[in-house]
Image (cartoon, helix red, strand yellow):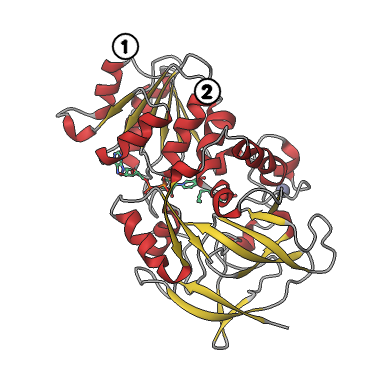
Amino acid sequence: MSIKSRAAVAFGPKQALQIVEVDVAPPKAGEVLVRIVATGVCHTDAFTLSGDDPEGLFPAILGHEGGGVVEALGEGVTSVAVGDHVIPLYTPECRQCKFCLSGKTNLCQAIRATQGKGLMPDGSTRFWYQGKPIYHYMGTSTFSEYTVVPEIALAKIPKEAPLEKVCLLGCGVTTGIGAVRNTAKVQADSTVAVFGLGGIGLAVIIGAKLAQAKRIIAIDINPGKFALAKQLGATDCVNPNDFDKPIQEVIVELTDGGVDYSFECVGNVKLMRAALECCHKGWGESTIIGVAGAGQEISTRPFQLVTGRVWRGSAFGGVRGRSELPEYVRKAQAGEIPLDVFITHNLPLSDINDAFELLHQGKSIRSVIHM
Ligand code: NAD
Ligand code: DAO
Ligand code: ZN
């Protein structure tokens, strides 16, 4: 039987979310009903709400950075039990598909086709409002008190970990640290440039510091972000608006020829070019993390690549969530990954639109929504 759930529903692009009571159908085979305790609000939620996301569907329940408790199991579910604490994964891990078995990527494709259409693996939705279907989002839909998630998209984590903090490991913090460790494989004593100092860029700084980078250059057009970047390990802070030449030239001059690694954490295709071109000739590697709007393309002169620079991309930090997230949670519990610094605001679900406003105004890193 369906249960009632308060949820923030995105009824259309550019519209404020509406807090309504939706019906949540029981989990089917291979699915799990999760009570969300807390969820972060990431720039990607705002991006989808803006209407620029090619996969954005409405009406939908957004949210992909949550933590919760298993409430009920669909038929055949064995890897989690009622009462377990879990983090929903927008990048699942089936451990059986060609991608999972390759050992080369975290981009499990087991449920990709339906997830991209806002549906559960059987092609239907579990959310209903006034008798009409509501789409899922990224397979997680954490802006609802109750959500249904495929078993392969749940990382089981220790019960001692505070869900209102470790929810941030469901996206931003893991994405940034993972991109440094798994994608770029930053080496000790290297030089790193980080473009964009939101939740993702700050997590890249933490990752670079953990990798013992000797110089970390933090770049943002909002100087209000610099204090925290420095606290986390940035050695230099640069505002592109302070210069009358391209930012890549500024970084190349600062670093005697360019950085060893750069990370684009904004979603701006011009900045992606700058991030590549500030890399050192012969070996510099740039990782794109930011998500650009529908239809946008990157460009550079091919000679940039011919002369040894490398362009990469990273989704969820290359992290295989079911296998690796418990370790991230343990590191956070041990104080090796600071989470408190990201949480600038704690808000009830009823105020979730304020979280989007704070993000747009550059006043928040992460707002955590308490369900
Ligand atoms: P955010 O909005 O909190 O932070 C973005 C930062 O970029 C802000 O500090 C802003 O001032 C800065 N910025 C904007 N324009 C700039 C410019 N021209 N030059 C320098 N800095 C600029 O966003 P976030 O939550 O940190 O997310 C960052 C990006 O990462 C988004 O595009 C998001 O969709 C993407 N993302 C990707 C993944 C992934 O797996 N690849 C995961 C999560 C988020
Ligand atoms: O497998 O084709 C695919 C898509 C996987 C989705 C990865 C999304 C990463 C970028 C968006 C991050 C938002 C939190
Ligand atoms: Zn898989």
Circle number at residue 186: 2
Q: Secondary structure at mark 1?
A: loop
Task: Please name the amino acid that badge 2 sits on.
Answer: Val
Q: Nearer the viewer, residue 366 or 44?
A: 366
* Residue 238 coordinates in the image, percent (x, y): 27, 29
**Of helix, strand and loop, which one carries label 2?**
loop
Density class for disc 1 (Cα within 10 Å; few <14, some 14-19, many ≥20) is few
Task: Say if 209 sits above or below 139 in the image.
Answer: above
Return the residue nearer the eye: 353 or 136: 353
Q: Position of residue 65 (x, y in %)?
A: 54, 54
Residue positioned 32% across, 15% down in the render: 255
Mark 2 surroundings within 10 Å by alpha-carbon count, few (fewer than 14), some (14 through 19), many (20 or more): many
| Rendered-image quadrant of the C terminus | bottom right
Q: Report how far apart the C-alphas of labels 2 and 1 lie in the structure.
A: 19 Å
- The residue drawn where x is 85% and y is 64% is 76
Q: Which residue was labeled with disc 1?
A: 256
Q: Which one is in front, 184 or 363?
A: 363
Q: Is residue 130 above or below residue 109?
A: below
Is residue 51 in view?
Answer: no
Question: What's the mark number on residue 217?
Answer: none
The answer to whether any part of residue 294 appears in the image is yes
Work out whether residue 189 or residue 86 is closer to the camera in this orientation and state it. 86
Quarter the N terminus occupies: bottom right
Amino acid type, label 1:
Asp
Quarter where residue 205 is shown: top left
Q: Could you tell me residue 44's position as x and y percent?
A: 44, 54
Q: Residue sitting at 52 percent across and 66 percent down?
A: 143
